[in-house]
Amino acid sequence: MSDLDILKNCKRLAILGGTFDPIHYGHLVTAETVLKELDLEKVLLIPSGRPPHKQNVNISDNEHRYLMTVIAAEDNPDFIVSRMEIDRPGMTYTVDTLKTLRRICPKRCEIYFITGADAALQISTWRTPGEIVKMCKLVIVTRPGYDKNGIEAELEKAGIGLDRVVFMDVPALDISSTDIRNRVSIGRSIRYLLPPNVEKYILKHGLYVYMPDKKTAKKAEMIIKKLQKALSQRRFIHTRGVAEESVRLARVHGADEKKAYIAGLLHDCAKDIPNKEKTELCKKYGVEIDKVLAEQPDLLHQFLGAELAKNLYGIADKEILDAIRYHTTGRPDMGVLEKIVYLADFFEPSRRFYEGRDEIKALAYKDLDKAVAFSLKHTIDYNENKKRLIHPLGKSAFEFYKKYL
């Protein structure tokens, strides 16, 4: 039986979509408020697949987000959880979801689509907003002080009449998924922000990098604050993704998770420094600039990053410093932590898709050496196609690891 078969006889339905990474009490209060205020039969909770507005954002695995949503909704018979978007290939758009539901629900079923005031301020950028409101009414969830004039102007821009919109105040719960993820990553409590069973699921599966060690959590918090100033938003998202992926790999391969997290956070700490300044800092810290580095100064960031990690971030651990120093080129006979950070940088979730990425990621959780061999080959092939020089370390690393292909 499909998770949507129950809707075949539903006459009044609301949809609440989102990444739900993780789902929390703010989502659930919104769903319950709309359910009761509009006298609905069901609220359909839909974890998103690949939303176009979050392509550069690190999002957890689809199955984790789906299962957390199921757990959160399990004690409310009026909530249904669907995997229709996470199972749909390619980008996921609201208009496509509504078309599917219109085929399932009775012809006269009243459907309401729940969205927040912030999202409503961008509704003209949605795919075919006019077609969306032909299939449903919008429920715009508001809080005191929201920009009603701005929303109405945006609705007019999108060609949506106010007769297709319901404005609804909900209890102001100042909870966000981003804050929950950040709290977990530095070992702070998330109790009372989301259902207890969802919290247990997060901790059991090591989502968002749970770090109970107070000393490490304090160190990580300091690093994160500095990195937020030193890196662009996109680079910072990537950095967090590498840190989290490194911990997951460390857990599977028996490496030190705390070291993996710190190395992942700092691997690109020099990435956004202008190339001219990178060169000057390399001279200051005694980093040798060979022919390849002189022609491709972007590669300097791995060597300079290790020096900055040591001198600006207070990292003395050789394993961490080596993982940073060789995370781009690799080198022969890398240590476990070096391989982990090298691979995490290669396929963390916010990375743009490339052919072979998912295969290398799956391999990395089984055999680090084979995954390194395939990723080195991919990197060398890519750079040769771009007519770029290959750094000697990359060449020698491939010669060492190609036996695992």
Image (cartoon, rainbow, N blue to C red):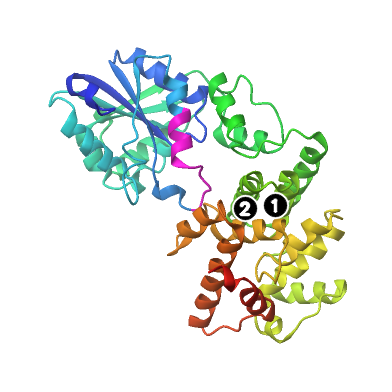
Query: Callout 2: helix, strand or loop?
Result: helix
Residue 358, above or below 157: below
Q: Which mark is residue 265?
A: 1
Q: Are marks 2 and 1 in contact (CB under 8 Å)?
A: yes
Farthest residue, direction front: 403
Q: Nearer the viewer, residue 73 or 124?
A: 73
At label 1, counting other C-alpha atoms closer than 10 Å, the crowd grade (few under 14, some 14-19, many 20 or more) is many
Residue 19 visible to an observer of this rendering: no
Task: Write the residue at 56% across / 51% down.
Answer: 365
In the image, residue 395 lies at what x, y percent?
A: 63, 79
Give the residue at mark 2.
Answer: 242
Task: Write the residue at 83% across / 38% down.
Answer: 215
Q: CA distance from mark 2 to mark 1?
A: 7 Å
Q: Is residue 16 magenta?
A: no
Q: Quadrant of residue 78?
A: top left
Task: Write the residue at 25% across / 36% down.
Answer: 98
Q: Nearer the viewer, residue 137 or 53?
A: 53
- Residue type at mark 2 is Val
Query: Callout 1: helix, strand or loop?
Result: helix
Q: Is residue 341 left or right of residue 53?
A: right
Q: Nearer the viewer, residue 186 or 167?
A: 186
- Residue type at mark 1 is Leu
At label 2, counting other C-alpha atoms closer than 10 Å, the crowd grade (few under 14, some 14-19, many 20 or more) is many
Residue 381, above or below 262: below
* Residue range highlighted in magenta: 56-68
Q: Quadrant of residue 105?
A: top left
In the image, residue 364 lies at what x, y percent?
A: 56, 55
Residue 299, above or below 175: below
Which comes before the other along the chain, label 2 or label 1? Answer: 2
Q: Quadrant of residue 337?
A: bottom right
